[in-house]
Image: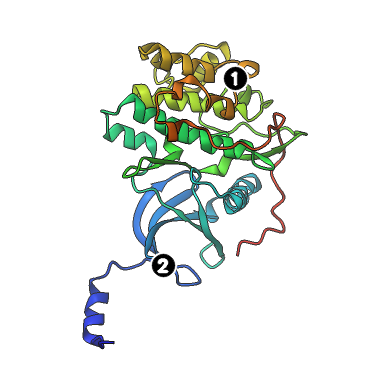
Amino acid sequence: MPCVDATDLASADKDAEPFEELDPTRRYGRYGDLLGAGAVKKVYRAFDQEEGIEVAWNQVLFGSFSGDRAMMDRLFAEVRLLRELRHENIIALYRVWMDSENSTLNFITEVCTSGNLREYRKRHRHVSLKALKKWSRQILIGLDYLHNHDPCIIHRDLNCSNVFINGNIGQVKIGDLGLAAIVGKSHAAHSILGTPEFMAPELYEEEYTELVDIYSFGMCVLEMVTLEIPYSECDSIAKIYRKVMAGVRPAALGKVRDPEVRAFIERCLAQPRARPSASELLKDPFFSGLDDDENSPPPSLAATEHCHPLSAPDISGLRLD
């Protein structure tokens, strides 16, 4: 085996992009550039040195809300959910740890090369209906997995900004499960959380099932088709709320000229009792134009009763490593 000159190694190391920090195992390195930022979380580009792949380094600073138990519960709930979910249409979690010295919770997830679906759609305005159907179907497959998970999982904040895409292969994945609720047959009251433009009426009333995700999915399809965020005609959350509760559809729906597409969206936005499940929508004629290998829904788990939200899980005994 040929020897490698130490000078060459030093030169190569000098040219390499520097890490801002390493995880405790020194396997993952975080770069300085942001992939995205939210109210409580920043997402950085990072690298898995063992596998040689880019990943996302999610970092939450506790200092700004250390006394907010509800927010802490939400963050730990996201971590617990991500750790047990394994599906090609759900963002995967690789590692999580607490950094007590810097008061941060850090977790490494897979990264989608093309970012979120909202920005991707804005960059690529000329997209066929077939492509939109393929993306929509993958979101539904991911929802079907969540809703048939044991226990059932409701996302509660599905929108195009937290659906991610690998544009080179057209693969779509659901992410940002921080508002998700693990649910069962009993229920308890909990706070209203979500993105107002995408929230089903019953979500405001805090009596809901996993079908709120189907309503949000319908709004995602509407945004993908029209390139408009639903209810963008409203200049306040209060106006959005009044329209949603009155059953007034967003103005963008009037711009959908294809009757098949409009009927599919309307089916997703129907009243809860008439709203289909993800499993049922996967069999909708809306997807009949896709290739045979893309049109057959995956085997669904046994049908479950509609679920009702539980209170946030106890995190007192949560081990992160």
Q: Residues within 10 Å of mark 1 (few under 14, many from 20)?
A: some
Image spot of residue 107 (x, y percent) = 51, 57
**In this orientation, does residue 240 appear?**
yes
Quarter of the rendering containing residue 74? top right
Residue 115 percent coordinates (x, y): 36, 44
The residue lying at 56 percent from left, 63 percent from top is 97
Picture layout, residue 188 above or below residue 79: above
Residue 311: x, y in percent?
72, 40
Residue displayed at 47% across by 24% down: 219
Task: Give the image quarter of residue 188.
Answer: top right
Q: Residue furthest right?
A: 186
- Secondary element type, mark 1: loop
Numbered circle sitting on residue 275: 1
Instruction: Residue under label 2, please give it.
Output: 21
SS label for mark 2: strand
The image quarter containing residue 289 is: top left
- Amino acid identity at mark 2: Glu
The image shows residue 245, relative to residue 306, as above or below, that is: above
Q: Is residue 228 above or below residue 263?
A: below
Q: Is residue 2 left or right of residue 283?
A: left
